[in-house]
Image (cartoon, rainbow, N blue to C red):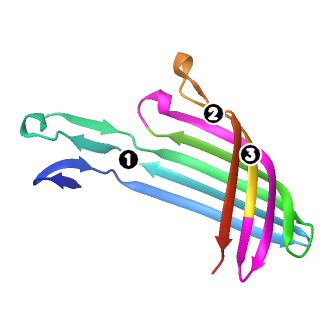
Amino acid sequence: EDKLEGRRIFEEGDQLEASFRIVDRIGRFHGSLFTQGVWKKDDTSYGRTESDLGRVSTTTPGTGFVTHGSVLYGLSDRIDAGFTGDWKRFQVSDNAFYNGDAFGVGPTIGTRLGDGRSIRLEGLWLTGSAGSGDSQLDLSGFAVTAGLYWRL
């Protein structure tokens, strides 16, 4: 609950998150799968002034699901290359324009730096959309992600 000058202006809804990760290595192959779900109840916004206190709006701030997986092959003791896949489904509003899903697949290359550290570069060809009908937004394209990972 957020307050401004003693008046309640925002109340965040309850949220539940669950995730699962599996990582395995068989010979020179390395695979990983991560999936997560977030279920969010409505947030409530209250007016900012005394005259607005009667006005209340409720929003659905975000329920979503993510699955991300990769299969890599060890080209050497330090370098891996392979493919990555990614799927996201999101519902962030009662307005259908802000809801949708996206799927991507593409190449991945990574290098191990030692001490549990690694660098990975992923490219994903994406397809997906948000919204419906005439107000549909095309989410197709290409995304590049670079990451530095450090396993403690």
Which mark is drawn over residue 145?
none
- Crowd class of label 2 (few under 14; some 14 to 19; many from 20; radius 10 Å): some
Name which residue lies at 10% across and 54% down: 6
Name which residue lies at 68% across and 33% down: 140
Inter-mark Cα distance, 2 to 3: 12 Å
Magenta range is: 93-119
x%, y% of residue 143?
69, 44
Quadrant occupied by the N terminus: bottom left
Q: Which residue is mark 3?
A: 124
Quadrant occupied by the C terminus: bottom right
Name which residue lies at 83% across and 67% down: 30
Please identify the residue farthest to the top as the structure is shown: 134
N-terminal label among 2 and 3: 3
From the viewer's perspective, is the residue at label 1 or at label 3 nearer? 3
Q: Which residue is mark 2?
A: 139
| In this view, 80 is above or below 92 | below
N-terminal label among 1 and 3: 1
x%, y% of residue 46?
20, 41
Inter-mark Cα distance, 1 to 3: 31 Å
Q: Are marks 1 and 3 in contact (CB under 8 Å)?
A: no
Type of amino acid at the residue the image marks with label 1: Lys
- Disc 1 is placed on an element classified as loop
Inter-mark Cα distance, 2 to 1: 26 Å
